[in-house]
Amino acid sequence: MLVALLRIPSRVGFRLAVPVCDTNLTLANAGLSMTKVPHMALFAIFFVLTALQFEQLNERALTWSLLATAALGVIVELEEGASRTGNCRLTDVLPDIAGALIAGAGLLSVMIVRNRVRRASTLDE
């Protein structure tokens, strides 16, 4: 994870500037940001891997994983702005969170099925 976070600043030899970020929360910016399918996929994977680090897959694990995913998205945007290698937009965190929510829906459905199977097996005994 550390290597991935250092990849963006390393492309410019760690010569960083104060990030200039577009903080306008407009529909145009949001629409442009939501076209970043690779961000959705990568952050969905990050969300799942983060959730699996917890002892139990429950609401607490999903909540902390969502917060970690959003924080990582903000860090990536700040790195892009500071290194001048990408567009630093606040709305670019939206596809990251969308990917996490999609993965979260998948994990939540697994949790529901798992709980129903457990209940059914305890009723059969």
Image (cartoon, grey):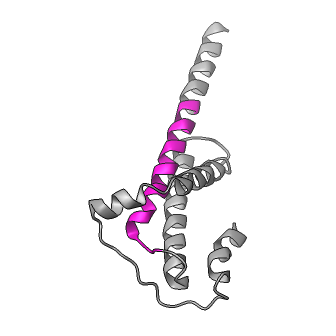
Total count of labels: 0
The magenta span reads 87-110
In the figure, residue 31 lies in which quadrant?
Answer: bottom left
Residue at 52% over, 83% down? 84
In the figure, residue 72 lies in which quadrant?
Answer: bottom right
Residue at 50% over, 43% down? 102
Please provide percent x and percent y for residue 75: 53, 72
Residue at 66% over, 51% down? 49
**Quadrant position of the C terminus in the picture:** top right
Please state if 79 lies on the left or on the right of 23 as rendered: right
Please provide percent x and percent y for residue 20: 41, 84
Q: Is residue 101 magenta?
A: yes
Please tell me whether residue 91 is drawn above or below residue 46 in the rendered image. below
Q: Residue furthest right?
A: 3
Please tell me whether residue 73 is drawn above or below residue 103 in the rendered image. below
Please provide percent x and percent y for residue 71: 51, 66
Which of 115 and 52 lies nearest the eye of the viewer? 52
Residue at 56% over, 41% down? 58
**Quadrant position of the N terminus in the picture:** bottom right
**Overall secondary structure of the magenta stretch?**
helix
Please state if 60 lies on the left or on the right of 1 as rendered: left
Please provide percent x and percent y for residue 55: 68, 46
Q: Residue furthest left?
A: 26
Q: Is residue 83 magenta?
A: no
Please tell me whether residue 65 is drawn above or below residue 16 in the rendered image. above
